[in-house]
Every structure is written in structure tokens, then in C-alpha cells.
Image (cartoon, rainbow, N blue to C red):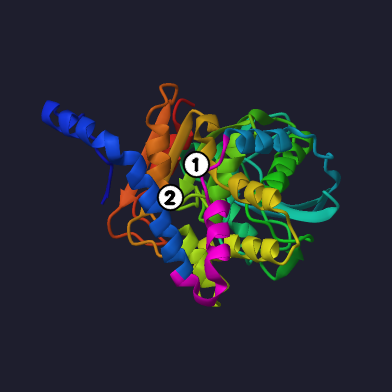
Amino acid sequence: MPYHHASTPPLSPSRSLIAGGLSGWKSKAKATAAAAALCATTVALGLAGASQAETLQRIFAPPTAAERSAVLDAWAEPVAPATRWKVEDSFEDEGYRLDVVSQRVEGNRHYSAVRTPQDYRPGQPAPILVLNHGGWDGIEAEWAFELVDDCLADFFVVVPSFRGEELRIFDDTYESTGEKSLINRDVIDVMALISGVVDNYPGAQDNDVSAWGYSRGGGVSLMLGIRDPRVDRVVNVFGPTDVLTYPDMINGVIGHLRGEEVSPYYGFPGTFVEAYYDGQTSFEELRMQLLGGSALHFADLLPERVQTHHGVRDTIVPVGNARALDRALKPRSDMITNEYFEYRFGGHGALPGLDQRATRMLCADR
């Protein structure tokens, strides 16, 4: 069964005195801990040496205010509008229509599926739900047909592929072009898709957009909620929230650099680090890549309705990602819905009751 974490109680007077007495040596302890971390990293890297270990410490250091501002400025830069919208094929089932659509986004041909509301009439007002998939091998368009419970029958449900991936439906395969991305360019693809749906389906509401994603798609959904003001509800299912300062990130990246088999949660940042070591990107570009894929550091910009699900036994994306986001959102007084469901026996797969909880949140106040 899922459960919520209780908040930490305040320090008792005796503990407060102890905490005050310890404050004098905290700075020395931090310096000692930093030196120990550098030493441990050096040992883990083996022949790579202290200089590379120190570089990794700098790469995965907490972001500065200037770096966060630089990322926000980059996001604010205008993106060329998508062009050449085309309906490639259509399918109907029990009052729903599923269109396979394509458009040009940043020079790439991008394929998605759009399921209309049941018995849709052009001009009929309807909210939009974006389903963002996990993994790196594309997605089946039929997923859009599965969300019909409660109010979801009245939504436009859209399923994007991401650049460099396949959209599959029945016996047909459509391959989006472009280089695969870690969240950043995925978000651009999805924002362009939302605009395309609003422009081409009369009644699709650009002020009522929800995002529901799994794993990588959970990270995309969170960043979509941060970057696109049209998105007002997010369901995040075991998505990565921090690829910059997660406590075990350096060790995971070291494993990747040494050729060990590691989770994509560590492997993809590891490929960014490799590109930096090979001279393909600058230190500043690398930091922006990592920060730009870490919703935790922009939690104050998430919409007012966020629901997160994560299994304690997840070996792909550590549960600490969800716990850190939950801690970051708790101080916000403006949240209408801020729910975190943790599944004691859950892994990186089916979580009992998830669909019902997500549907309840997406249908609330409608």
C-alpha cells in the first residue's frame, strides 16, 4: 500500500541546545567531508586520477543562482513554430477517433497520436491530456484508447513520440527524426504538439492541459509543467527529478565511464560527461544540460496540482528522486493538490491503484 511521509517534528529544547553547541565545528566538518568525497571519487575512478575526480565534483555541484537564471533565460528564447501539420492516418473505435499526425519541429519530422473526445464535434470545448512515455524505444499510439474512465472520455488524449523514436500503431511504424534528447528537447516536441492540437482541433482548450508521464516521461511531464504555462496538472510516475545533485549520481556516472552496466538514470548523464571530456561541449553547456533536466531545482515553478508515484524498490530511477521533490513542494502554500504516493513493494512498473488516483486528480473540480 502507498503511504505519505509524516513531516519532521521540531527540535525539542534539549536538542536545540545540542544543535547550537555543534554549530561551531560545522564548517570544518563540511570541509573534511568534501575532502573525503574527493578522495572516495578518486579511488573509485582508479587510473583517472584526482583531477578528473575534482572535475566530477564540480560538474555535479549544486546550481548557482546565475546558472538557474541562465537556464530560465534559455527557455524564454522563442522557438520557431512548428510547420507542415499533416494527418497521416485515422482510426475509429466506439465513438473515438485516433489520428496519427506529423509536423516539422526544429527541422525534424515529429509523429504523434491524437485521440479525440468520445463523439467529438468540432468546436466542442475539451481539455487536453498529454501521455509521455518512458524508455528510449518509442511508443504504441493505441495507449490513447486506454484512458476512457470518468472524465477522461471527454479529453483530447495525445501521445507524442520523441525525436529519434518510433510511433507504432497496429502494423504501421512512423519514425520521428532528430537526435534523441534527455527531457529538454522532448519538452520542445510536446509543447509544439500541444500548439498543433489547439490550432487544428476546434474546441481543444489551451488553458486546460494536463501531463501524465512515466519514468523519462515523468521527467518530461514535470519539466513541461515548469516551462509551459498552459499545463496546470502533472502526474509524475517514477520520473527523474534531479540528474545534477542526486547523492549517488557521481558514483553512477563513474560506473558508466568505466564501462559498467548502469541504469539509464546514470547512463544518460554519463554520456553528457563523456561528451564534455571529449571536447564536444563546454563545462557551462554541460551544467545547463544537467540542470535543464532536473525539475527539483525549479519546483517553485511547477503548477498548483502535482501528483507523484514511486516504488521503494525501483532499481531504475531511485525513490530518492520523488522524496526530494515531495520535500521541495511541501513549503508551497499555493498548491491545490500536492500528493505523493510511495509504494512499499513497488518497483519500476505497475503500481496498484495508480490509475484510479491519477484519474481522480485529473477529474477533480470539473
Q: In the shown orientation, is residue 183 left or right of residue 314?
A: right
Percent across and percent down for residue 75 are 70, 37
Which residue is more in the foreground, 65 or 234? 65
The magenta region covers 43-64
Tell whether label 2 touches label 1 (CB within 8 Å): yes
- Which one is in front, 248 or 187? 248
For the point 46% across and 64% down, the residue is: 41
Tell me the residue at 63%/55% (across/down): 182
The residue nearer to you, when weighing 199 against 58, is: 58
The one nearer the camera, 294 or 164, is 294
* Separation of marks 1 and 2 at Cα, in angstroms: 8 Å
The residue singled out by tag 2 in the image is: 321
Q: Is residue 326 left or right of residue 137?
A: left
Numbered disc 2: secondary structure: helix
Q: Give the labeled residue for mark 1.
A: 296
Q: Main secondary structure of the magenta part?
A: helix
Q: Is residue 33 above or below residue 118?
A: below
Tell me the residue at 70%/30% (across/down): 203
In the rendering, at what x and y percent does residue 146 appear?
53, 53
> Judging from the image, what secondary structure is the residue with disc 1 in?
helix
Which amino acid type is shown beneath numbered disc 2? Answer: Asn
Q: Is residue 104 left or right of residue 224?
A: right
Question: Label 1 sits on what residue type?
Answer: Leu
